[in-house]
Structure formats: structure tokens, C-alpha cells
Amino acid sequence: MNAKGTPIQDERPKVLVVADRCFWAYHDMQKFIRRHLSGEFDIYPDFAMFHPSAHPETFMTKVWKWKYLAKSLRYRRVLPRGEPYDLVVLLGFYFQVTSRMTVRTRHLIKCIHTDSFPPPGIEESDQAISMAGFLSKYLDGAEALVCGTKGIADRYRPYFPRVFCATDSWEEQFGRLTPKTKNTGPRFLVGWTGQPRTAFKGYYDFVVPAVQEAAKLRPGIELKSRFEGPLSTLPRFYDDVDVVLVASVGDSGPSLFSEACCCDVPAVSNRSGRPAEIIQDGVNGLLVERNVTAMRDALVRLYDDRDLLFSFSQRIRNDLTRVYGVKPMARAWQDCFEAVLEGPPCRRRDDGD
């Protein structure tokens, strides 16, 4: 209210940021955007799971969904039905296909955060889809595309008019309680976190056998894994980890890599996603081929050369956050939003039609 009791109109652009569901990676990205851009934009958080599914659901799926929605409702904030947003950001490019969304917006941004084509999230019948077919079906109506790494952005730039690189930052959530010190003892921990049954992460096909083979040559080498648990305790997983082993293809991250870097833990990784951008081979980590022998040999090399390993630890956090830290990522999202909002509105649309 002003001095006369008249409501003061909020002139910030109204931006709806849609994640898939609460407590998962896109929710963290949504919170990052809201935390760092609310000064310039009026951010509304929503979730695709609150919208009707585009496909039939079983009774048990509906029961689970209602229970999950009840826990998640307090994280949602939306305008009254029918009121338009200045900008809608779909953190998953596929939300309009998998959900029946009905939100009005003047501008639309869609996002891709996986480094493969076609990216995960497409319908099963579209596994052989062409780039032209993908653009037509999944990126229809979008004025800009936000990609999770520069490599993903480079893939789409020849085909899409406005492509930006922006993602979450792990700098605020992950860090050490005490400085990293050089490990000179016989025990050597190789860390891994994530969903082990996700095939493209390579846990069972590459990570486990590579560590097992390395341990035959250097018995002190052990694998330390975590598959689930609260995010609040995850930073402490890395306290005694010497190196993480990344074998993913298709990830824009993986998160394992960024989390470890922010805890001063370097990586042995194949050339994919964010590690391919950040790791300078032999300077702040090791890049290897995606095979068990190459990964085994890299682990043995670092077990034997603790000075080299410690030199990686001393610089990997800064090397990551210089590119994917809080300031550059907040600036990237802001630049994207401002560029789209300054352009002419897209055709008037009801998302999901």
C-alpha cells in the first residue's frame, strides 16, 4: 500500500518456472533461479506433476501421486487460472507433451539438460526421431532454448535461433568443513553417487569393474557409493573421498562431478558433459576413454602419485565455479530472461494446446 492506501503494483515481470516434481534436480534449479533472480523478476514456482498426465495412469499411480502432491503443495505458487505470465520457463522440454498444461504466457523458454540425441524425456515411439521432427514436436512455440552445458548448446545452435547455456550451481550447497589434505595412507576411496540402474551412468558396467580391477593391483583402493538419502547430508559423503569416477554418457553433469569439485575432490572421467568442459587432462583431473582398462589405469596412477592428486584437489573447485558458479549462472539466467522479454511476444497461446 502507498500512503493513500492504494495497492502498489509489482512491476517485475511475472515468470513461471516449471520443474517436474518436488525434491528432485529440477526443483533445486528452480530454487536457484528464485533465490538469485527474485529481485528482478516475480518468480512463480510450479511443477508438471500438478497438471493432468497426457497418458493413462494406473490406480496405484494416482494414489501415489495424490500423496506426493499433498507434500508438495506448499512449494507451488501460481497466478489465478487464466491470468497470463510474461514468461514461462519449462525446465524439461518435454513437459507439454507428457502433461496437459494450460497456462497463458507472452513468452516461452524450454530447456534441455541432457547431452544426447534424442534426449531422455521423449516418448518411447520417438526414439528414432529426426532433428526436424524433434524441433517440431518438442520445441514448438519456444522462443529460446536453455541448455545445461556449452556442449549441448553447440548441438542445437545450428537448428534453433536462440540458444543459451545456464543451469544450477552447486557452489552454495557443497563445500568442505575443513581444508582438503594430502592422503598419504594406504586406504584410497573412489566415490560415486547417483541412480545405479540408470544405464547411461555406467555404474555397473564401468565404475564397479574398474575399481575392482584397480584394487587387484593396489589393494588399498575401495569404492564408496551412495544411492539415496537427503541432500543435506550429501556434502559430507565427499569428506574422505580421494577421487570420483565418472562414466556417464548423456548427462549434462553429472551432479556427482559438480558436487565433488565443490568439495575439492577431483575426477577421473570419460569425455562427456561438464567434465569434458572443465577437466584439463593432467592439470585438474584425468580424462580417459570409456572403458574399464583406461579407468583402472587412471585410478592406479593417482594412487601412486598423491602429489599429482593433491594438485588436482587444490584447483578443481575454482575451475568449476569460474564457469558454473553462482555468479556466472545467475547472470546467464538473467541475460536469457531479459533477452526473451525484450523481444516481440510469441503468438498468444495456451501451453499444452
Image (cartoon, helix red, strand yellow):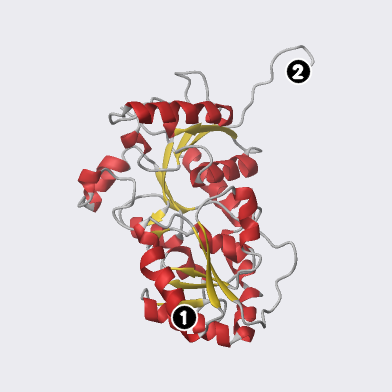
Which residue is at the front of the view, 338 or 109? 109
Q: Residue at x 44, y 75 (%)?
A: 212
Which sits in the foreground, 321 or 266?
266
Say which amino acid is labelled 1.
Ala
Residue 289 in the image: x percent, y percent? 38, 77
**Image coords of residue 43 (percent x, y):** 57, 34
- Report the Cα–Cα distance between label 2 and label 1: 69 Å
At horizontal 33% and vertical 52% (from top left) the residue drawn is 119
Disc nearest the viewer among 2 and 1: 1
Q: Quadrant of the C terminus?
A: top left
Q: Give SS at disc 1.
A: helix
**Quarter the N terminus occupies:** top right
Q: Which residue is mark 1?
A: 214
In the rendered image, which residue does mark 2 sit on? 2
> Which of the numbered marks, if any, corresponds to residue 200?
none
Q: Residues within 10 Å of mark 2 (few under 14, many from 20)?
A: few
Where residue 90 sits: x, y (%)?
43, 39
